[in-house]
């Protein structure tokens, strides 16, 4: 007899914005947006905080997160701040405080792990937990986790519980904020099939647009689609996966240990930088990215065997170049050495750069080999 799994997806509600409201409780109930670069921090005048307004922002920044009041005005994560300003010019704009987010992320993860130890971290604000072997009802278990998180962090979360990760993740988003949604296979037709296909993690904007062009708007319509039609437009493997998820099928395990396969850092410039005229500034940015990568690798106790650079030009065209290292590397000076090697493979000439990125990939842990001296140039 096969025991039906019980998987939980715990998703913090408007996480970054909610952390900011702990510091500025007077903003509760107002549209608040977090994100951007060079955003002015709140200042105090006559004992009261003065906050920047979204409508006054100029630049290329994007929305990191927004309160539900701002979302009601059409603002959402990853939207450009300039576009968001058109929708909600009077919204409060706050700079991101990643140190605070990491602190509260650790607290919320600890709360869940103490109650349901088998967890899979998915980012700073969400995780999966396998609660199959926990002898407590789903409703009681979810309430216990919500209460623990609220007591320790003063933040709320939404929890989805289902037989697999696919349905649990969809469920956690159905009753936000501070919601609990429990799905069974019998709920598929009534709760999941009426939803748009974009709710399925793995169906991105391009796939959604193609499905919509085929007359497939909802998960239910996808479930009823002809396999031959999907294969024609998406290929055999992806078409098979689309039909499986539309029928609520997902056998992927909760991975209690996740080892990153790569670390990357990138920077979008406030203005397009000219390869020649801004050469020194570009060099500074490249070194800063490598220094940040060194810290990431040290924290993960990993070394890189492959270095990749990413360049986005002023016309938004993007290229990448990558190559193997002669030995696993971690220090910024070696990351910089190999990044420059890849840059030499790009015909930059007289172009302007919008973005520059460096990725450390092909990672190995606890490298103990003797570091050979490289000729750094």
Image (tube, rainbow, N blue to C red):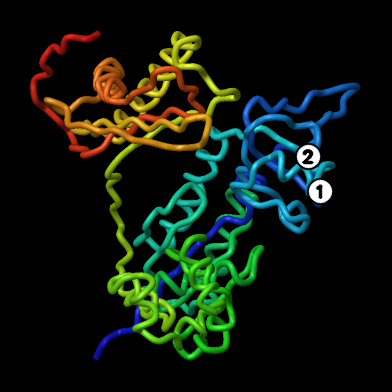
Give the residue pinned by disc 1.
Answer: 30
Q: Residues within 10 Å of mark 1 (few under 14, many from 20)?
A: some
Image position of 175 (left or right of 32): left
* Element carrying mark 2: strand
Q: Residues within 10 Å of mark 2 (few under 14, many from 20)?
A: many
Specify the farthest residue to the right: 46
Q: Which residue: 72% across, 30% down?
A: 58
Q: Which residue: 40% across, 87% down?
A: 226
Which image quadrant for residue 190?
bottom right
Q: Which residue: 28% across, 20% down?
A: 344
Which image quadrant for residue 134?
bottom left
**Percent x, y for residue 17?**
66, 45
Quarter holding the C terminus? top left
Q: Nearer the viewer, residue 123 or 144?
A: 123
**Percent x, y for residue 43?**
79, 24
**Percent x, y for residue 218?**
55, 79
**Circle 1/circle 2 CB separation < 8 Å:** yes
* Element carrying mark 1: loop
Give the residue pinned by disc 2.
Answer: 92
Q: Nearer the viewer, residue 241 or 14?
A: 241
**Percent x, y for residue 325?**
16, 27
Work out how far the residue at label 1 is from the one at label 2, CA to CA, in angstroms: 8 Å
For the image, the number of numbered tags is: 2
């Amino acid at each position: 007899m096969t025991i039906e799994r019980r998987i939980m997806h715990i998703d913090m509600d408007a996480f970054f914005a909610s952390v900011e409201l702990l510091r500025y409780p007077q903003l509760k109930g107002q549209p608040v947006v977090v994100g951007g670069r060079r955003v002015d921090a709140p200042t105090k005048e006559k004992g009261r905080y003065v906050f920047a307004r979204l409508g006054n922002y100029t630049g290329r920044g994007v929305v990191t997160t927004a309160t539900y009041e701002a979302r009601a005005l059409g603002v959402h994560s990853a939207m450009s701040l300039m576009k968001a300003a058109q929708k909600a010019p009077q919204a409060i704009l706050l700079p991101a405080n990643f140190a605070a987010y990491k602190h509260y992320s650790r607290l919320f993860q600890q709360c869940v792990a103490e109650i349901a130890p088998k967890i899979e971290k998915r980012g700073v604000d969400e995780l999966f937990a396998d609660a199959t072997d926990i002898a407590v009802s789903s409703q009681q278990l979810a309430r216990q986790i919500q209460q623990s998180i609220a007591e320790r962090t003063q933040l709320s979360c939404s929890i989805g519980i289902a037989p697999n990760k696919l349905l649990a993740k969809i469920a956690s988003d159905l009753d936000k904020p501070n919601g609990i949604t429990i799905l069974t296979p019998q709920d598929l037709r009534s709760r999941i099939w009426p939803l748009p296909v974009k709710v399925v993690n793995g169906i991105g904007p391009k796939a959604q647009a193609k499905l919509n062009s085929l007359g497939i708007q909802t998960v239910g319509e996808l479930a009823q689609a002809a396999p031959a039609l999907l294969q024609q437009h998406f290929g055999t493997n992806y078409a098979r996966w689309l039909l499986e998820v539309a029928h609520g099928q997902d056998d992927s395990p909760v991975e209690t240990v996740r080892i990153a396969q790569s670390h990357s850092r990138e920077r979008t410039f406030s203005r397009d930088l000219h390869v020649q005229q801004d050469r020194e500034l570009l060099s500074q940015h490249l070194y800063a990215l490598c220094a940040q990568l060194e810290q990431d690798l040290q924290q993960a106790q990993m070394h890189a065997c492959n270095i990749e650079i990413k360049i986005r030009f002023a016309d938004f065209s993007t290229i990448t170049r990558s190559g193997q290292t002669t030995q696993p590397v971690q220090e910024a000076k070696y990351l910089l050495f190999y990044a420059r090697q890849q840059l030499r493979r790009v015909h930059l000439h007289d172009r302007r750069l919008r973005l520059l990125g460096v990725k450390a990939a092909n990672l190995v842990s606890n490298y103990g080999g003797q570091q050979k001296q490289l000729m750094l140039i």
